[in-house]
Image (spheres, coloured by chain):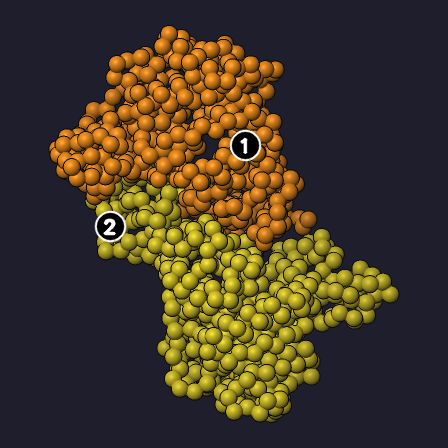
Chain colours: A yellow, B orange
Amino acid sequence: MAAEHPHTRLRVIRAGIDTYQQPVVYMHRDCAVCRAEGFKALTRVRMTVGDRQVTATLNVVTGDHLAIDEVALSEAAWRAASPDEHACATFRHADPPASAGALRAKVFGARLDDDACLALMRDTVANQLSDIELAAFVTACAGDRLDVHETLSLTRAMVAVGETLDWGDGPVLDKHCVGGLPGNRTTPIVVAIIAALGHRIPKTSSRAITSPAGTADTMEVMTPVALDLAAMRRVVEREGGCVVWGGNVRLSPADDVLIRVERPLDFDSDGQLVASVLSKKVAAGASHVLIDMPVGATAKVRSDAAASTLTDRLLATGTALGLQLSVLRSDGRQPVGIGIGPALEAHDVLAVLRGEAGAPADLRDRALAVAGALLDLAPGAHRGTGLDLARQALASGRALAKFYAICEAQGGFTEPGAAEHRADVPAPRSGWVRAIDNRRLAKVAKLAGAPMSAVAGLAITLRIGDPIPVGAPLFQVHAQTVGELRYALEYVAAHPSIITITEA
Amino acid sequence: MAAEHPHTRLRVIRAGIDTYQQPVVYMHRDCAVCRAEGFKALTRVRMTVGDRQVTATLNVVTGDHLAIDEVALSEAAWRAASPDEHACATFRHADPPASAGALRAKVFGARLDDDACLALMRDTVANQLSDIELAAFVTACAGDRLDVHETLSLTRAMVAVGETLDWGDGPVLDKHCVGGLPGNRTTPIVVAIIAALGHRIPKTSSRAITSPAGTADTMEVMTPVALDLAAMRRVVEREGGCVVWGGNVRLSPADDVLIRVERPLDFDSDGQLVASVLSKKVAAGASHVLIDMPVGATAKVRSDAAASTLTDRLLATGTALGLQLSVLRSDGRQPVGIGIGPALEAHDVLAVLRGEAGAPADLRDRALAVAGALLDLAPGAHRGTGLDLARQALASGRALAKFYAICEAQGGFTEPGAAEHRADVPAPRSGWVRAIDNRRLAKVAKLAGAPMSAVAGLAITLRIGDPIPVGAPLFQVHAQTVGELRYALEYVAAHPSIITITEA
């Protein structure tokens, strides 16, 4: 190793720029470091601050925004370096990441073994891979380019580089829904039913990434979800179940990093999907897992053939990991429940748990189906009795009581609010509803403000096959500001095919 | 299309941040646009400034570096938007690029046809593809994943999206060297010989990307090279040849964009290499092209087998494009000439052209071989006579006179300078030189300051097979500052295997 260059010392300041997870450092074009090291824009540099070393991407600053002896750190770089006041940093070209050989081999057609996957996931969580290297990895694994063995190796590696929860002896139940279906918020209901029946179900959920609401967003309008591991454990020990945000728990953190390139690329890959889902389940300490798989033209899984292939991969990998796993295929053609958006979905959840007359029957039936299938999977279950058990727990009010108890344990229950501004979208003509575009419907809810505005979104009771007279409401948009309401309505006006109506 | 959101108007300022070619915009986390649009870090946004539309990647700013009603533009975004004073910008989510479908299809194993390649290259030059999408494209084409037909389609598309030079009737000669061999600066000599013999050779060259000197850097220490197309045309019309920097001419600009992800990924792909090289030759208006291909363990082409495969692809694609093309395989095991670095290489070039006693014989012989092979390829040539013609042009001084004339036409000739600080690297023991690591040798020259410091680099006369006594100089490092000299020497001390010496 060469010693550090004598002129490569810069004062560290905070740029206050969020570049997502990728550490970026900003240096002046004319600074001694850029000149001595031959750094240019996008050079990968290794920064040493005190006893910390951070690999980052360089952006070069011209003009007088930055002094010539300063380096400004993006938020991710600042967190990684955690510099003292008046800290200085030294720099050199970053060595190639340890997993560069494994990445290269995979790109050129080799198979990934356990060691290669572990090296790649270690570098992924340690931010040793740039976004373009991550994109290359995701591309090299896209489609069917990860076989069953590689999927298993990748899943194990993703578990190995994160935290793992240990719940001691006995079964731990869990569920997961593959791909977004707007409003399909069964989790709080399922957790309440399963825990009410005496099983353990320590559920971690995500916030919205591209959808109008994640389960954590919906749950958060009713109770705190940003619990740390110790608090989560106390809730589960007391009530048997919880619904908390997974972001504070660091289960399968490699998956969170890969998402930053998977999301914009949107390359489906059964292998990566399976590794993503199952690594989180294994890390969460689950032993019995039910996968809800909605299938439909505008859902994540678009055909029965795709569902079968994905199911086979999930079962093969899950079994190899020692999980008891079952897949429940469901209708993914249209939204579930009435509301789309955090608070609107929370109202649906509460209506089902409370057994209200206006509660959405489809959400109730789906939650019962998922809970029933999960109960059938549990040890000692009499196969086929799960659905009845779930129905009884819901009808008796035991599930509602358990839900309140879980919310209390998480920090207290709050009734969800409602949006100030609402507008109906009228049907442009009479006919029958032939199709509903889940993706565009989700987009309307997002334009209305969801999930940042928790009460924003939309309400839709219409379903495929329903008759609709001209002028009757297709759905209702909810927003906190007039601007957001108008924006969502403009999008609706520009996209008349969100609800396809067949002439009567 | 939905109308713009009413609150999405921000004042445009210049960030003064160089993010290489990718346009980046910086917005405050709490600004109306981020809130209304649900923008997050790395969101792809479409910005409208006046009648210009720019697709950019978002970075989110916290703190008080940026006002809440401002948007700051990176240099690439600033150039693309070219805003008036006091300009405002509006924003929306970027539509997926037109070539997203073609990219996706290629990633999932489909073949690229002409239309797909054209869509991809159009989006590439228009900055519609983010770095991670470009990385996905490069990865999907890596190794042997581009077949002959795709290579041809891609080459044609790269030509189509850039400028094309038209030199009128008659042959236009050109040469290209595949991959870096330090000091292999034959181009100025070859151009002088070919033009002295009455042929046209309008040569565009690149600056260093990862090497201590590009041909344009070396040429620039002797004459201006940053000529625009009109000036280049005047030089060629007057003298028959030129050596100018290609960056002002915009030949195959898609290639320049792809390089920004190919360089850090370093994925070899014959298809992309062929498309890169031949698109520039076709765009430059060449009709007869000689490809110099050094082969060696630390060269770009590492084996005879790799050289054969690449040669076949070059010939097949070149012929389909209507080029007369020939490939000259050469020794890529060690540097060529004495100097490595812009001015040091210029001294070698001049020594050869001037016929000086100390001129490096290997550089002279290579330049003659390349010129000879190119002359053999020219229309009306008697095959096998090219080398003699080249020798005569060099020995007679006609090549030197033509070189001076070309430099005059480009803006005047300047004698190259020399570095202030020099240090010999002594042999650690006696023996014979068994191998020379081209890549590490290039690294030493870069650490010494090349190419930013034009006179920096190193001089090496040692060749494989030479005897060396302990303490005799292996090579000499040249630098403009003591710091850079020390830095290069520290690297040398840490890497004793740059020159492998077999015990006597």
Location of residue B152 in the rendering, given as x and y in whole percent from the top left corner: 59, 36
Could you tell me which quadrant the C terminus of chain B lies in?
A: top left
Q: Secondary structure at mark 2?
A: loop
Which mark, by number, is residue A45?
A: none
Q: Quick check: A139 left or right of A236?
A: right
The residue wearing badge 1 is B315
The answer to which of A319 and A358 lies nearer the viewer is: A319
Q: Is residue B103 left or right of residue B502?
A: right
Residue at (64% x, 42% y) in the render = B113
What amino acid is labelled 1 in the image? Leu
Say which chain tag 1 marks.
Answer: B
Q: State the residue position of label 2.
A: A86
Q: Secondary structure at mark 1?
A: helix
Q: Residues within 10 Å of mark 2 (few under 14, many from 20)?
A: few
Residue most extreme to the right: A504
Q: Residue A18: where, in percent of width, then height? A: 43, 53
Q: Nearer the viewer, residue B282 or B100?
A: B282
**Between B367 and B252, the one nearer to me in the picture:** B367
Residue name at image x 13 percent, y 34 percent: B470
Disc 2 vs disc 1: which is toward the camera?
1
Question: On screen, A181 above or below B143?
Answer: below
Residue A415 vs A182, above or below: the answer is below
Q: Is residue B458 above or below residue A115?
A: above
Q: Residue at x 72, y 64 (%)?
A: A436
Q: Give x and y (percent) for residue B226.
A: 44, 22
* A492 sits to left or right of B73: right
Residue B216: image location, x then y, percent: 40, 25
Q: Amino acid at mark 2?
A: His
Mark 2 falls within which chain? A
Give the side of residue A277 with respect to residue A45, left or right: right
